[in-house]
Amino acid sequence: MLEIEELQGFSYLRFILKCPNKFTSLIAPTLRNLPVTYRVFCLLIGLLFLWMNSLHTQNQRISFENLGMKEGLPSVNVFDIIQDQQGYIWLSTLNGLVKYDGYTFKTFRKDAKDSVGLSPVGRSFTTSLLAKDGTIWVSTLTSGFSHLDPYTERFINFPNPPKEEGEAEFARTYLVKEDAKGRIWMFEIDVPTRRARVKNYDPETDSVSIFEVGHAFTGRITIKSTFQRFLVEDQDGGIWVHDPENGVFKYDDEKQEFLLALAVGEEAAIKGNTQQIIVDRDNLLWIATDQGVQVYDIENQRWIQDKLGEQELSFVHSLYQDQ
């Protein structure tokens, strides 16, 4: 423990440099008890330190290195970026899935002649997801999704099934998350109608399932974060999806379908069209709507209106919990 009374002369300088945040609260109140010479010296040193720190902050510059097609990138349209456990950067681009080692680019695209898993399911990629086991999932604009082992660079492909005549073409796929059970959740979009449905891959059964939840997107459908607003997992592993016009659905593991849990409407639990849902650290479900915010206690299955007090909110688009 550093005692104030033991500080003499240059001991003040060492303490200021080592503990600048404590100087004002710990040292300054004691200066009045010291000789004038010490007080003036410590004050000058403190001011000098603050000036040097301010000058250093002002001179800090953020530099960027631009990487484009001239450097080997196959497309300047990059929709998603992740880093694998080896440190390599993977970019989902309009013209291939790209691996970047800090010096060179390696591009992976669909190869019709490939029969051993050396190429992904398509050419144009939308999103990527790093799984807990270190493998990578990637999705495409028109072809489906792929599972990549970054160590062997081998792919397992999940192509979209053939479209039936008169059927909507849910071709564009966006990955959202891996849940506690290792299932991969995603949305697939029919671009002309902007309709969406939920899809998942279950590694336990090695199967793909599709769920209709009545989605119609009004935002940009080229951004991964758009879809992360619609599907969340609670602390008990429950999967929740919201639809702006109908409400919030919860996945029933036994029935293997989404059931409407919280409906939208004047007489229903949710008073406005939903915009986003998040689950906080207390396992509470927060729902942003065009008429404010509502909070639902998942464990006790009840609304918590006193969490917000008197709201003066109208249209709430986004929610975020800080540290």
Image: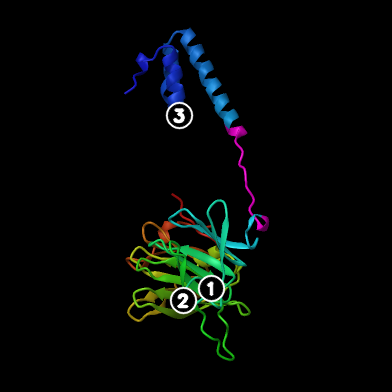
Mark 1–mark 2 CB contact (< 8 Å): yes
- Label 3, label 1: how many angstroms apart (C-alpha)? 50 Å
Measured from the top left, where is residue 63 in percent x and y?
62, 43
Residue nearer the viewer, 34 or 310: 34
Disc 1 packing (10 Å; few <14; some 14–19; many ≥20): many
Helix, strand or loop: magenta stretch: loop
Secondary structure beneath label 1: strand
Measured from the top left, where is residue 103 in percent x and y?
57, 51
- Mark 3 / mark 2, whichever is N-terminal: 3
State which mark lies toward you, 3 or 2. 2
- Magenta segment boundaries in residue numbering: 57-70
| 265 falls in the magenta region | no
Query: In the rendered structure, which amino acid carries the disc numbered 2?
Result: Lys
| 61 falls in the magenta region | yes
Secondary structure beneath label 2: strand
Measured from the top left, where is residue 222 in percent x and y?
60, 67
Measured from the top left, where is residue 289 in percent x and y?
52, 66
Residue nearer the viewer, 126 or 282: 126
According to the image, label 1 marks what residue? 173
According to the image, label 2 marks what residue? 199
Note whether residue 143 is visible: yes
Secondary structure beneath label 3: helix
The answer to whether 194 is drawn above or below residue 80 in the figure is below
Note whether residue 291 is visible: no
According to the image, label 3 marks what residue? 21
Can you tell which quarter of the image residue 248 is in? bottom left
Can you tell which quarter of the image residue 317 is in? bottom right
Query: In the rendered structure, which amino acid carries the disc numbered 3?
Result: Asn
